[in-house]
Amino acid sequence: MKLRIVLVEPEGRINMGFILRLAKNFNVNDICVVNPKFNILDEEVLNFAAKGSELAGQVRIAKCLDECLKDLELSVCTTSYYDVESDVIRQSISLKHMVSIASNYNSLALVFGRESVGLTRSELGRCDLVMTIDVGSEYNVFNLSHAVAIVLYELLGVRKPQQAVYGYLSSREQLNYIVNYAKEIATALGLKASDVEIALKHVLYKALITKAEGRVLYRLFKSIYFTLKHCGKPASDSVSEDSDESA
Amino acid sequence: MKLRIVLVEPEGRINMGFILRLAKNFNVNDICVVNPKFNILDEEVLNFAAKGSELAGQVRIAKCLDECLKDLELSVCTTSYYDVESDVIRQSISLKHMVSIASNYNSLALVFGRESVGLTRSELGRCDLVMTIDVGSEYNVFNLSHAVAIVLYELLGVRKPQQAVYGYLSSREQLNYIVNYAKEIATALGLKASDVEIALKHVLYKALITKAEGRVLYRLFKSIYFTLKHCGKPASDSVSEDSDESA
């Protein structure tokens, strides 16, 4: 999706810097700023932008909101205040519903207002939709850059397939080695090996353990097994002395 | 869920202020700070906290991380860097998986490290789990307060039942009035009234329109109907002159 962040008359250099950093975090390159109250290339902006400072030179400066809404299929204005009954201009949708609607379009402008007073009624009227972030607390007014962070996260944060665990998942073979040692240990100690096998398999698979974690557990169980064996404990000798590398 | 935000040696007053504001936004009252590099009641902190400054006096200051992890069922440390293979201490879970795990516990500490260098290996080792926010871009390092915003949003932002639209939804009766006027108008103009009825119903129900929006549309269609009628256009007179208040 082609996404443009539109800021209307931002007042704070720190927020501007943070928003450039967020744009870099979320890989958004299209930023349009209406009549900023400072120089986008100000040193304080660039400091707070961290690696997002690379984007500062690409920011488009516009004289009015309409310039920033050109060439996009859908525009969404944001507001903290939503009148629940009488005011047609502040009839708002939720962030999650906006994401659901936006997924039907190829290009989208997200419009954020001033730190002090947000967007004017005239500006709200220029957008196709009005959106409010409401997390169910009494204090709904987010700092500008944090509102941007939350909206970008909800809209783009799931772009990457959502894995539960980072890193390389333990192989079935590695887990089998661990389980086999545990069964031998259980048998040696007079415990029911099949119960240990089942419980440990559930634990290992629920834990989505990684190779690095698996290696630690493998060495632990192997070490227990051979220590018990040297004490004359293991009932059988069925576990071969495989190398650490194979697990 | 009992949630504690734990900050380890935060360096920036602005971030501290923003995090207090976020705590207020998300209705989190339990904040524990290990060895902060400034006074929590510093004026700059309070300014950036906005209404979150109310929470500044309740922040607990601790000498070490363990003090902040007491009396909780689960602790999750955060890191931007996750070693994908060899380093057992940085084997990380994703934010969404953390939320799924945390939903099984009654109390949780979320631990965030220093702006400059994050959490030490020793601190990461104190937590039950390590988590990374990864949104699929090349630049994964979030500003501290924005990482807090995103984690709190994902964990707590759905606490409130997720409605799509804020405000009072238009009543079925109000929508029927609109549809009936539209059908009469269609008939008067020689169009297929049943097609207009179906299309308009789909549009109105897909749009989840509110009472305030419905009132505007109702008046529009009613006005068109009576204007056409005075031009001698409507074929029938079946729509009664109901008052605006009833729609």
Image (cartoon, coloured by chain):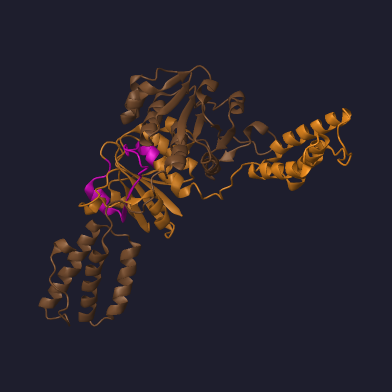
Chain colours: A brown, B orange
Give the farthest residue toward the left. A230
Residue B178, quarter of picture: top right
The residue at the point 47 percent across, 35 percent down is: A147
* Magenta stretch: includes residue B231: no
Name the residue located 49 percent from the left edge and 45 percent from the top edge. B27
Relative to B64, residue B189 above or below: above
Percent across and percent down for residue A244 are: 14, 63
In this rendering, would A44 be left or right of A243?
A: right
Examine the rendering and report whether any part of residue B40 can be seen. Answer: no
Name the one closer to the observer, B203 or B20: B203
* Residue A17 percent location from the top left of the image: 38, 27
Residue at 54%, 28% in the rendered image: A118
Q: Nearer the viewer, residue A137 or A203?
A: A203
Q: Can residue A64 be seen here?
A: yes
Start and end of the magenta stretch?
A: B118-147
Image: A155 above or below A48: below
* Front position in the image: A84 or A156: A156
Number of marks drawn: 0
The image shows residue A126 at horizontal and vertical percentages of 59, 26
List x then y, in percent, for residue B97.
39, 54
Q: Is residue B141 magenta?
A: yes
Give residue B129's quadrant in the image.
bottom left
Quarter assignment of residue A41: top left
**The C terminus of chain B, quarter of image:** top right
